[in-house]
Image (cartoon, grey):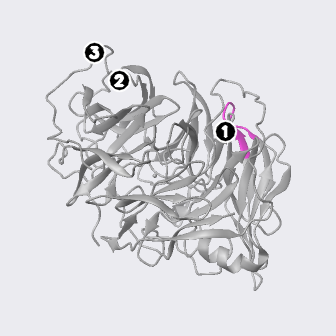
Amino acid sequence: MSQPPSHGPYNPPPWQPGPQGPNPYSQPPGQPGRPNPYAGQQPPPYPPPFPHQGQPVPPVPPGPPTMPPDPSGGGGRKGRRTALLAGVLVLALGLGGGGLWFTVGPGGGSGGGSGEDRVEQSAPPEHSHKKTSAMAWQAPAPKGKIKDHVASDARGTWFTEKAVIKAEIKQVKTYARDDGKVLGEVTLPGDICGDRVPPSGGTLAVTYKSGKVCDKLTLIDLSEHRRVWTRTLPDEYADGEPVTWSTHTRVKDTLYVALDGRLTALNAADGERRWTRNLPKGWAWGHLVGGEGRLLTTLQRTDGSGTGTGSTSRVRELSPADGATKWSWRVPANKRVEVFASTSPLVLGLATGKEYVVTEFVSLSDSGKRRAGIPLLKSGPRSKDGVPNLKHVPGCGYGGDGCSDTVITNDMVYLPTEDARSGGDAEWAENKIVAYSLATGRVEWSKTTGPKRSGIPVDVDGGNVIVYAEATAESGGQLIRFDPDTGARSVYQRHPDSDSDTERRTYAPGTPLPVYLDRGQFFIVSESLGGSEEMIITAYE
């Protein structure tokens, strides 16, 4: 069985495509609850590269950045859980006029402080929403395919007050959120590839493939539905292998691109280079994440085996202005940062050794000091049948993708437990939502989603944690409101019992799909397309 290229701190295992693409844990239709996604959580098909020489971790010196010759090879004017992290970004986006709120998801807010004690805040009012809501519209999915055991990538979903913006293999489409009408689209010459970064200032930066390499960076104007400029990035890693994954992010009006040991800042308006920082040989930039005005990265070397088991890595916050290091945190031995679960407060998802699964959350202060750890493993044997024995299933992605089944807000993290399943003919599944303090790592409360209900946290509204409780054979799905302090439960929204079968098939055609809650409106979205999917977006009223 063929495998993706082995660039990265580990060699990805073979992909096993399921109904939603590269998914090894599909379940039979009609079976209640969610399958354990950690029967093989995978990194993206082509994770970013890391070099293989070892030496002490070098500091990135402050001061003026180095400015080597421009390697881009041209550019010129030519005419989004999964998203970066959960949270709300304010964008001046001209879709329907005026400044609009942009929500990035799936899974929870990134607000709140990151001090040593929880910050009590006045809860805003809930968004207007229907107490009973049925499906309003669906958008047909483009035809995906499975190639080399990897499904077509359709990650990237973002919302404005009036629109839904969706990355769809090689298109970026804008839908009216009230009726699903296509407001505009931009078709790219190749498939979208690499990191998915939220829009800012009414524009979206994406990378796409030319042939088999991921080397084209382009800026899209979302109000005019056109490409503003396109820049050619290096197409080879330092060892000569083709670039198949672009590591990039954005902070306000600056784009940042990392490749091997080079970090380059570009002006978002025209794609022109602002500065470049280089690391000594043997070290490389890893993940690159922007959020809440912060620029965060990992720095890593490997022992040459490609597994990352002997690696040394750091998490660093850099100055967005010049790339100077603000602070550096050493990742514990034999562990690596798999995902930035949140940027504010800063929460990291760590994996161990050769595993591809987040087994621990660690919260850091604004100055890069460790605050608390939250283990995700059950007590007892670490693994069962080769699969980490998890008590929580956070749904984490890779790098800046965040964790789709986790809400992080107001210095708390809200996690779902693994499902408890019934036996016999009357099948059902039930789980709990558990609230942890990011200051102490302690459990604040633990509550069931509901009788014979399995659910995942999706967002925060009115200061309350909102959980999607899946439809059952007898009743439609529900959005459940949990008081953040006590865990007291009430119904936020009900979906029709008459549509329960349709809702179940839509949400979990084999593998549960990402869900979003934005301004009181609920969405089910496909972000991996293997060719059998009929709809890419299902929107409720």
Distance between the alpha carbons at the discs numbered 2 and 3: 9 Å
Asked whether the residues under the numbered discs 1 and 3 touch, taking CB atoms below 8 Å apart as contact, a structural biologist would say no
Q: Is residue 496 above or below residue 165?
A: below
Identify the element where label 2 is drawn.
loop
Q: Is residue 231 magenta?
A: no
* Left or right relative to 341: residue 116: right
Asked whether the residues under the numbered discs 2 and 3 touch, taking CB atoms below 8 Å apart as contact, a structural biologist would say no
Q: Which residue is mark 3?
A: 64
Residue that appears at 22% across and 37% down: 53
* Left or right relative to 466: residue 347: left
Residue that appears at 79% across and 79% down: 474
* Amino acid residing under circle 1: Thr
Q: Which residue is mark 2?
A: 323
Q: Is residue 36 above or below residue 317?
A: below
* Amino acid residing under circle 3: Pro
Q: Which residue is mark 1?
A: 409
The answer to whether residue 332 is seen in the rendering is no
* Amino acid residing under circle 2: Gly
